[in-house]
Image (cartoon, rainbow, N blue to C red):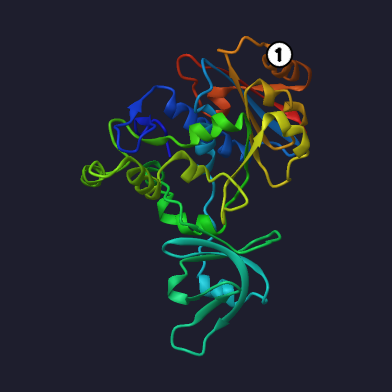
């Protein structure tokens, strides 16, 4: 998706019209540009992008969304064909019309006209399985969750056309490190077009007749928040795209899993670990509202001692919006 093709806007209430800001689209676009740059990145080198923002509200989430929007969709497949090839006990993720289920495969029962898919904890008609993929890691227990709804921007980016396949086999290669309380607050917001509500007007009118708690539950079920696209990992989710780490305890998680390709370091507490992160793409977000230049000094020292500068305009095809300063360079891994 080209962030300049539409005017993007944020709202913290799905029933309230979203408000545009000139920095929203460019931050989403930056995540997409870095995703595309990997093809140009020499083996054994890492791209580091450093942003200096007036305040870092939403910056990590929006940049991460751009990364996910530009992730490749899984190769098309027929779920039944995938499952027929599996040995009993194989961890799988299946997507139905309403749920994502992570469980162990038991068997394909083809005794009847419509085959049945048997998992250890449930069974389904084959026609009810919209996508399926093997899980390449251990699965301790069966997990079921309502299918996340990606919202308006995912429709703009045409992710909705392959959304079920993406949920079955997510790339799950993004990590964001920062203050978890602030990150989760950001993920509760909604990204859409300027002046639009996430909830359509007819539904909005009906919701206004309900009590506050009931309205909140129904709105959450409609999806469309930043979290519904970034899909942060937790022990109760059946599918996910993004690992979130607390900056205060990030050292305990190093080195990061090798399948992480993009790491967003949100704030000075996270940026101090920039030299220890080995992912191909690292995005550092400096908050100018905080009177601490330590993180900026660390980033500049890394560029001056080991870095080879690249052009944001020529190499990434990205232009910082007013109020945001940026530099980019590569370093050896």
- Residue 254 picture location, percent across and down: 77, 37
* In-image side of 177 versus 317 (left or right): right
Give coordinates of residue 152: x percent, y percent: 36, 43
Q: From the viewer's side, name the closer residue of 194 and 251.
A: 251
Determine the residue positioned at 73% across, 32% down.
249
**Residue drawn at 77 percent across, 36 percent down:** 252
**Vertical position of residue 325 compared to residue 81: above or below:** above
Can you name the residue that lies furthest to the bottom here? 111
Query: In the drawing, does residue 270 fall left or right of residue 218?
Result: right
Does 14 appear above or below 305? below
Q: Quadrant of residue 279?
A: top right
In the shown orientation, is residue 78 left or right of residue 152? right
Quarter of the picture containing the N terminus is top left
Reply above or below: 34 against 129.
Answer: above
From this view, report whether residue 287 is shown above or below residue 252: above
Give how far across and how far down residue 128 sits, in percent.
43, 71
Q: Nearer the viewer, residue 216 or 21?
A: 216
Residue depicted at x 43% and y 27%: 24
- Name the image quarter holding the C terminus: top right
Name the residue at 73% across, 39% down. Answer: 43
Location of residue 192 (image quadrant): top left
| Residue marked by disc 1 | 294
Mark 1 element type:
helix
* Label 1 Cα crowd, 10 Å radius (few <14 / some 14-19 / many 20+): few
Between 113 and 47, the one nearer to me in the picture: 113
């Amino acid at each position: 998706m080209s962030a300049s093709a539409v005017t993007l806007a944020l709202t913290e209430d799905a029933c309230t019209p979203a408000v545009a800001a000139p920095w929203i689209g460019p931050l989403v676009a930056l995540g997409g540009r870095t995703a595309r740059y990997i093809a140009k990145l020499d083996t054994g080198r890492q791209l580091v992008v450093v942003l200096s923002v007036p305040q870092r509200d939403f910056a990590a989430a929006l940049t991460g969304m751009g990364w996910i929007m530009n992730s490749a969709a899984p190769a098309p497949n027929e779920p039944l064909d995938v499952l027929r090839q599996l040995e009993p006990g194989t961890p799988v993720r299946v997507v139905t019309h309403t749920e994502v289920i992570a469980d162990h495969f038991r068997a394909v029962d083809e005794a009847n006209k419509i085959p049945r898919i048997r998992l250890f904890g449930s069974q389904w008609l084959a026609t009810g399985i919209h996508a399926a993929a093997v899980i390449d890691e251990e699965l301790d227990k069966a997990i079921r969750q309502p299918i996340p709804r990606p919202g308006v921007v995912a429709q703009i980016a045409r992710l909705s056309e392959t959304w079920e396949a993406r949920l079955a086999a997510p790339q799950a290669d993004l990590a964001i490190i920062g203050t978890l309380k602030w990150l989760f607050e950001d993920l509760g917001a909604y990204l859409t077009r300027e002046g639009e509500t996430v909830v359509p007007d007819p539904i909005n009118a009906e919701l206004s007749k309900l009590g506050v708690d009931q309205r909140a539950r129904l709105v959450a079920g409609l999806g469309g928040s930043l979290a519904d696209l970034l899909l942060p990992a937790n022990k109760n989710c059946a599918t996910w795209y993004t690992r979130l780490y607390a900056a205060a305890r990030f050292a305990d998680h190093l080195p990061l899993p090798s399948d992480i390709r993009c790491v967003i370091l949100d704030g000075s507490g996270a940026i101090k670990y920039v030299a220890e992160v080995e992912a191909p793409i690292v995005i550092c977000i400096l908050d100018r509202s905080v009177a601490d230049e330590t993180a900026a000094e660390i980033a500049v020292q890394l560029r001056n001692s080991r870095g080879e500068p690249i052009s944001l305009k020529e190499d990434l095809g990205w232009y910082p919006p007013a109020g945001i300063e940026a530099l980019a360079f590569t370093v050896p891994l």
